Amino acid sequence: MTSETRIDRRFAALKTEGRAALVTFLTAGDPDYEVSKEILLGLPGAGADVIELGMPFSDPMADGPVIQASSQRALAAGHTTKRTFELVREFRKHDQDTPVVLFGYYNPIYVYPSERFLDDAVAAGADGLLVVDVPPEADDELCLPAIKKGLNFIRLATPTTDTKRLPAVLRNTGGFLYYVSITGITGTAAPDQKDVHAKVAEFKKHTNLPIAVGFGVRTPDQARAIAKGADGVVVGSALITAIKETLDAQGRSCGKTAPAVLHLVKSLSQSLRTG
């Protein structure tokens, strides 16, 4: 297994503080490289504890229309996997503590190709990978090589993940377990607080990993409610929506994008700090 990572240290520190992590998701390069960098650099100051950086892909099957559109905007602006690594490197010039998780699909990693991708991810300063379409049965393909490089490999668990399936999901998982609070795609429904807390409690009988809950969390009130029974709350579609709502008819930022996103992050963060 990996030695202690930024992700491990951050969740340990937050446990001492007695609060859940705010995990923010953004698509790298959305709506363009410079605005994406501005948002990324501002996230820690706005209260993000862990950053998930989506790698744009033309066929993001687990994502809802909001995040799919963000990938399309980034790709249309010329974003590439190499540019994602440039963003992480830029971030690390300013912040050596906040964990960065690269979120995406296997196809762009495979064609990069995989070994060079892992080397470049580590060199840029990434801390973990969450690749939604690589199952535990294929751990030799990407998961185990990533762990050997010092990256946490983060897995998804869902409402349909039962106790028979859970050991396979947990076997090589590191950093945290990402619990998908609803069935379906991102950003299309709101999670039920009681159901989420019950499922998290069930998973905690089988792992000491922190459990972060995502899919459908949009507002500070929702984040506060979910956080009462989880180690982290993941917010993505709401931030992507904030980006979209500031763009002009041609999909370009008019200077309001980063402030709007960071204002929302700040309100979400405050909700987790005030309990």
Image (cartoon, rainbow, N blue to C red):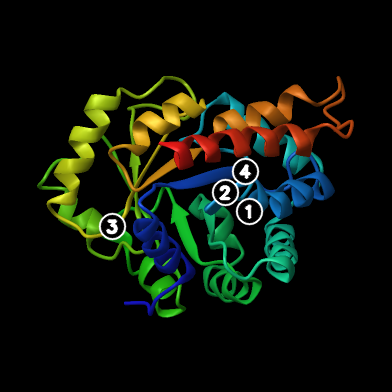
- The answer to whether one can see residue 274 in this image is yes
In this rendering, the answer to whether 75 lies above or below 250 is below
Residue for badge 2: 48
**In the image, residue 240 lies at what x, y percent?**
64, 32
Alpha-carbon distance for marks 4 and 1? Answer: 13 Å
**In the image, residue 167 lies at what x, y percent?**
16, 56
Q: Nearer the viewer, mark 4 or mark 1?
A: 1
- The answer to whether one can see residue 160 in this image is no
The answer to which image quadrant residue 93 occupies is: bottom right
Which one is in front, 269 or 213? 269
Residue type at mark 2: give it.
Ala
Q: Quadrant of the C terminus?
A: top left
Q: Secondary structure at mark 3?
A: helix
Disc on the earlier residue, 4 or 1: 4
Q: Which mark is residue 44?
A: 1
**In the image, residue 111 lies at what x, y percent?**
59, 61
In this rendering, the answer to whether 154 lies above or below 2 is above
Disc on the earlier residue, 4 or 3: 4
- Please name the residue shown 65% across and 71% down the image: 124
Alpha-carbon distance for marks 2 and 4? Answer: 12 Å
Q: Which mark is residue 136?
A: 3
